[in-house]
Amino acid sequence: METLISLMINVFLYTFRRSLVGLTAVSVGLFLISVLIIYTIEAFGGIAEFQRLFELMPDSILALFHAQGGFGTTPTSYIAGDYRHPIYLITGFSFGIAFASGAISREIERGTILMYLASPIERWQYVLAKIGVLVIGTAIIAFSIWLGSFVGAELYGLPKGEIDNMLLVFAQINMWSLMLAFGGITLLISAYSSDGGLTIAWAAGISIVMYFVDFLSLIWSVAEPLGPLSLFHYFDPVGIARDAVFPWFEFLILMGVSALSMLLALYVFQKRDISN
């Protein structure tokens, strides 16, 4: 038993080391963007001026940020709203989708999976090791975004009473659960596929369709019932900052999707034939 656990830990550590370059690039990039976002407050002339500009924005722009109910009047709301910017979503998802696709299908495509499974490690242990890296990697990305916001606020000199760091933590927990949900879906596709590129294409396609469905449901009343079918429907950092609550319902939905996808990936990979 100890040998099997040791093998699983070795796979985890080896995979994590291989992912460090990409993970570091994404984390540092989003950290720096989060720092710079703070300085854009001044570019708008302050929060009060931004509020006036906000009132002039068309509904289609507000829908991108889930801000039809208002952005709020604090720097916390302004920062949280930016977390839904496509830069954060695309960059954050790039790690999860690329990693999860490479975790199984890319290894099968290259034939390296046979080297792993030639050792006494069980298939489910191999997948669990990969899931561990996915969970920790996406958590590091979410933490880097929050840290960038915190450091930016300190450097900019925002009064401590004007920013609620705990609400920004809540927003990043929400984003982490979203990244993990899409990572889990990608892992499930990866467990079925033997083509890493095709896995990425499917995962990216699903995420784009879901983003479009979420956006459409907010600007077109006919499509409104479709909103809950998109995972982006459950990512609302503006609402978290505005209402000052932890999004338990959204968090549980996204974590449920993550858990179900990962369990199915374990089952599919355990049953499939990869001999050729």
Image (cartoon, rainbow, N blue to C red):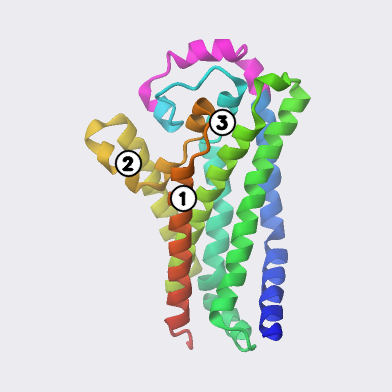
Q: Would residue 182 appear left or right of 148 to someone viewing this image?
A: left
Looking at the rendered structure, the kind of residue marked 3 is Ala
Mark 2, residues whose alpha carbon is within 10 Å: few (<14), some, or many (≥20)?
many
Circle on res. 82: none
Q: Position of residue 155 (x, y in %)?
A: 78, 26
Q: Residue at x 70, y 85 (%)?
A: 3
Q: Which residue is mark 3?
A: 80
Looking at the rendered structure, the kind of residue marked 1 is Leu
Q: Report how many numbered discs are placed on residues in the image.
A: 3
Q: Is residue 11 above or below residue 121?
A: above
Assign a secondary structure to mark 3.
helix
Q: Which residue is mark 1?
A: 252
Q: Would residue 71 appear left or right of 113 to someone viewing this image?
A: left
> From this viewpoint, is residue 260 visible?
yes
Which tag, 1 or 3, sits closer to the chain's start? 3
In depth, the one of 11 and 124 nearer the eye is 124
Q: Residue at x 24, y 31 (%)?
A: 221
Q: Hey, which quadrant is residue 153 in on the image?
A: top right
The magenta stretch spans residue 216:
no
Assign a secondary structure to mark 1.
helix
Looking at the rendered structure, the kind of residue marked 2 is Gly
Q: Position of residue 110 (x, y in %)?
A: 56, 77
Q: CA distance from mark 1 to mark 3?
A: 20 Å
Numbered range of the magenta stretch = 39-60
Q: Hey, which quadrant is residue 35 in on the image?
A: top right
Q: Which residue is mark 2?
A: 227
